[in-house]
Image: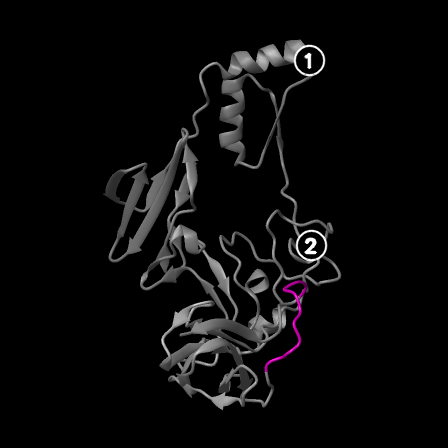
Amino acid sequence: MTHDLAVSSLDMVNGPMEVVGEWVRCLVACRRGTWITVVIHDEILHFRGRVLGLPDRIRDGAADTVTALAALTGAHPILLTGDNPRAAATLAAQAGITDVRRAAPARQGRSGTRARGAASTPLAAVVDGRDALLAVAMNGEPLPLEHGYPARLVVPGLYGYVSATKWVSELEITRFDKASAYWTERGWAAQALIKISSSIEVPAGFARLKAGDVVVAGVAWAQQRGIESVEVRVDDGPWQFATLAAEYSIDTWRQWYCEWNSTPGTRTLAVRCTDRSGQRQIVAQRPTVPDGSTGLERRVVFVE
């Protein structure tokens, strides 16, 4: 297989790719030419170029195995492949197979089927002006494999299962009533708007604290709206406003903290937040499925 490394303004190679039993990871930096770093196990190879050629090699004895299977079953061997015709024909000849047929991958849309791992993202959220991305790089470098190389979706305001698809290979515009996706087939909502919510990060649950001044801190979020206020309560006492950190954007977590003059005993801390539209965090507890959990976070601590 030969992979053209020129993709838009950033040179990349489709990966990962299995070559003779080895997993090869390619990291490409585009600066006046393409430097390619290939890592095979722990050995690092560097070279400059624009085309990376990877051979398909058939195992020794494959042709004998095909002949033996045909004799054993009496069946006519067929090579079903999605590779390009020339590569498929070469491989078939080496394996002693004369019947080569192209396999059309399952597609989401007209056939009513879907590709394995397909996800559905509401089109309106992609084109309404929010900072929706098809990301191919991060911090000036091609996306790491664990972050979705060669490309991933980033759509603020939606839960990840419909907005942060990794390892994107194909995009198709369709309708929810014409196609289904992996998570929606499992009972999750198609329109997965992120709910306003908040959490306590410190102190840890069931922590043992010294009586006196304690800092309670955490994060709150209300994507596409922004956080207006955060309040903290101890036991059944009054809600107290927390101090908010600077807001990077309306789509990021916003840090908060408050100082608590703690007294001995078993105490329950709770937090809630309000967005800029005036909507307050939902109190009722609901599970994650089908469209995100709700409820206030509470933490029990022991003050000595």
Of 279 and 40, the residue lying toward us: 279
Residue span colored magenta? 281-290
Of 165 and 93, the residue lying toward us: 165
Asked whether disc 2 touches disc 1, contact meaning CB atoms under 8 Å apart, the reply is: no
Between discs 2 and 1, the one toward the N terminus? 1
Give me the residue at 28% from left, 45% from top: 37
Density class for disc 1 (Cα within 10 Å; few <14, some 14-19, many ≥20) is few
- SS at mark 2? helix
Find residue 126 and name its label.
none
Density class for disc 2 (Cα within 10 Å; few <14, some 14-19, many ≥20) is few
Q: Position of residue 14 (x, y in %)?
A: 43, 46
Quarter assignment of residue 109: bottom right
Q: Is residue 97 above or below residue 238?
A: above
Asked whether, in this view, residue 106 is left or right of residue 4, the answer is right
Residue 263 highlighted magenta (yes or no): no
Of 264 and 173, the residue lying toward us: 264
- According to the picture, the residue beneath numbered tag 2 turns out to be 186
For the N terminus, which image quadrant? Answer: top left
Q: Position of residue 193 (x, y in %)?
A: 61, 72
- According to the picture, the residue beneath numbered tag 1 turns out to be 73
Asked whether, in this view, residue 74 is left or right of residue 39, the answer is right
Task: Kindly report the distance in space between the C-alpha atoms of the residues bearing marks 2 and 1.
Answer: 39 Å
Asked whether, in this view, residue 183 is left or right of residue 163, the answer is right
Which residue type carries mark 2?
A: Arg
